[in-house]
């Protein structure tokens, strides 16, 4: 296989990198990466790109992501999920459905959250999880988390099951802890399943062991949000050389294609379009 995208239904207990390595070995990929890391305890949709298709990942990473999560109340863990050690317990404060819905509404359209220590976010070039494994706590700056939708699925005295549609970089573990806190409780994420990334849906994915060559999506089949702009052969050569061009468009960014094949992403700078990333 030359290049493409694979939709994997990751099982709980495996790291995202493990899936990358498994598929790389199975299909002998030269290069492989994924769109949005899933924690080992999490399951669901993992979008894998290989070979030249890894170039398109930056243009897909800002798509909304949808999750199904279970929040357990009454305890707090060191990692914010069930993989961490319980570091605090507290009697659960009673709440009603309207309390949950009011808390959900308080997060939209965005709020600032502090990234968890058990995350891949880097501090001075070092992933935070490495400090976490050494029982070290590093100061983290709050980051804006976009919350497009929070939907209550079910709840009991000790658990809340909800769906969330969020922007890139939003930590669902932290969101779950913050939901519990705004209800006057402690909590941690018991389970997490990613359902969607943009137009990609977990229902179209397969277990990594079941992936076959016919399951690969070509770059041309991907749901790019950028408008496509067809160019001729002469302009294609210019695009491959990263040349600036004058194009009949007002869009801030364009996906240049030639005979249906994706060539490059160009961005508008004053009256000319400049190369942002070659995809050939």
Image (cartoon, rainbow, N blue to C red):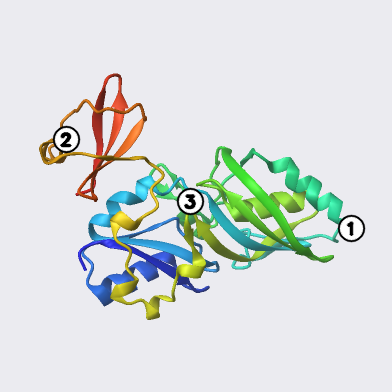
Q: Is residue 184 visible?
A: no
The tag earlier along the polypeptide, 1 or 3, is 1
Q: Nearer the viewer, mark 1 or mark 2?
A: 2
Side (left or right) of 130 relative to 251: right
* Camera-side mark, 2 or 3: 2
Per the image, the residue denoted by label 2 is: 242
Q: Residue at x 57, y 65 (%)?
A: 193
Q: Secondary structure at mark 2?
A: loop
Q: Which label was assigned to residue 73?
A: none
Q: Label for residue 128? A: 3
Q: Which residue shows up at 24% across the image and 28% down it?
A: 247
Mark 2 or mark 1, which is nearer the start of the sequence?
1
Q: Is residue 102 above or below residue 32?
A: above
Q: Would you call the spot at circle 3 few (<14 residues within 10 Å), some (14-19), or many (20 or more)?
A: many
Q: Badge 2: few (under 14), some or many (20 or more) residues near its Cα, within 10 Å? A: some
Q: In terms of secondary structure, where does tag 1 sit?
A: loop
Q: Nearer the viewer, residue 275 or 261?
A: 261
């Amino acid at each position: 296989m030359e290049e493409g995208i694979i939709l994997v239904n990751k099982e709980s207990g495996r790291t995202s990198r493990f899936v990358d390595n498994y598929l790389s070995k199975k299909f002998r990929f030269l290069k492989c990466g994924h769109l949005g890391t899933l924690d080992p305890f999490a399951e669901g949709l993992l979008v894998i790109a290989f070979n030249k298709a890894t170039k398109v990942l930056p243009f897909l990473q800002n798509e909304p992501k949808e999750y199904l999560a279970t929040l357990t109340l009454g305890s707090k863990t060191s990692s914010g999920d069930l993989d961490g050690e319980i570091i605090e317990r507290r009697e659960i404060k009673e709440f009603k459905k309207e309390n949950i819905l009011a808390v959900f509404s308080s997060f939209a359209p965005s709020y600032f959250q502090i990234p968890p220590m058990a995350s891949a976010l880097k501090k001075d070039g070092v992933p935070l999880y490495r400090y976490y494994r050494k029982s070290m706590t590093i100061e983290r700056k709050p980051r804006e988390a976009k919350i497009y939708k929070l939907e209550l699925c079910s709840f009991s005295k000790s658990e809340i099951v909800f769906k969330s549609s969020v922007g890139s970089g939003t930590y669902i573990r932290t969101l779950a802890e913050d939901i519990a806190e705004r209800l006057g409780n402690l909590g941690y994420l018991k389970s997490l399943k990613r359902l969607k990334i943009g137009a990609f849906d977990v229902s179209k994915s397969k277990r990594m062991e079941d992936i076959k060559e016919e399951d690969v999506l070509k770059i041309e089949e991907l749901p790019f949000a950028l408008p496509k702009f067809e160019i001729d052969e002469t302009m294609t050569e210019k695009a491959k050389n990263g040349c600036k061009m004058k194009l009949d468009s007002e869009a801030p960014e364009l996906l240049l294609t030639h005979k249906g094949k994706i060539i490059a992403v160009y961005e508008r700078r004053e009256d000319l379009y400049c190369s942002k990333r070659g995809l050939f």
